[in-house]
Amino acid sequence: MKSGKVLIAAACGTAAMTAFSYLISRKKNKDFREPRLLGKMVYRAVPEIKKPQAKVVGWILHCTTGLTFSIIYHYLLKDTKLKSNVPDGIVLGLVNGVVAVGIWKATFSLHPDPPQIHFNDFYNHLILAHVVFATTTLLILDDDKQ
C-alpha cells in the first residue's frame, strides 16, 4: 500500500467533506458539522471529559473515519474494477453516504443525550458530503493498481 498517498488522499477527502459540511451548515443555518457533532456527543456521554477535550476527540474520530475509508478505497481501486474518476466517485460516495446515514442513525438512537438537529436534513446532507469525500479521495488515490 502506498501509505503516503493514502494519507494525503484521506486528509484531502476529509478536508473537502468538512469544508462542504461547514459551508452548508452556514448557508442553511443548521448544524451539519460532523466533527462538532461528534465532540458534542462525546461531551454529553462522558461526564469526566472537558469540552475542549471532547472537541478534539470529535475531530480525531472524524479524521480517523476518513482515513479508514481511504484505506478501504485504496483496496477497492486495487482489487476491483473501480476507477479513480468522477462517476465512480459519485457512485461510491452515494453508497458510502447511505452507510454513513445508517451509522449516524444508530449512533443517535443509542446515545443517551443526542444533539437536537434536523435529522432528515442532516442525513440528506451526509450523502452529498460523502460524494464530495469519495470523489476527492478517489481522484487523489488514482487507479494505477499498485
Image (tube, rainbow, N blue to C red):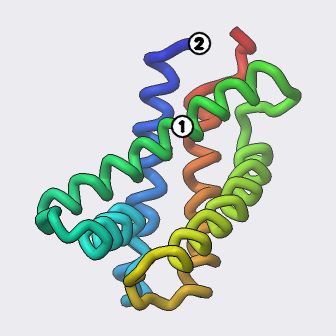
Task: Check the picture and name the quadrant holding the C terminus.
Answer: top right
Q: x and y percent of residue 132 in the render? A: 58, 55
- Quick one: quadrant of the N terminus? top right
Residue 145 placement: quadrant:
top right
Question: In the structure shown, which secondary structural element does the residue marked by tag 2 occupy?
Answer: loop
Horizontally, residue 129 falls left or right of residue 58, namely right
Side (left or right) of 106 relative to 50: right
Q: Nearer the viewer, residue 25 or 35?
A: 35
Q: SS for tag 1?
A: helix
Mark 2 or mark 1: which comes first in sequence?
A: 2
- Identify residue type, mark 2: Met
Q: Position of residue 40 (x, y in %)?
A: 29, 72
Q: Residue shown at 37%/89% (left/top)? A: 29
8 and 115: which one is in front? Answer: 115
Q: Is residue 66 above or below residue 44?
A: above
Q: Is residue 36 visible?
A: no
Kindly identify the amino acid type of the residue bearing the numbered disc 1: Thr
Task: Let me know if residue 92 appears in the view.
Answer: yes
Q: How far across and down, in percent of the image, does residue 71 sit?
A: 58, 29
Disc 2 marks which residue? 1
User: In the image, what residue occupies the spot 69% across and 59% down?
Assistant: 99
Asked whether the beta carbons under mark 2 and mark 1 sit within 8 Å of each other, the answer is no
The outermost residue toward the top is 146
Residue beneath label 1, please? Answer: 68
Check the image and report above or below for 34 versus 131: below
Instruction: Please name whichever residue, 22 or 32, is drawn nearer the observer in this view of the structure.
Output: 32
Q: Work out which residue is located at the far right of the displayed protein and give it.
A: 81
Mark 2 to mark 1 CA distance (whole Å):
13 Å
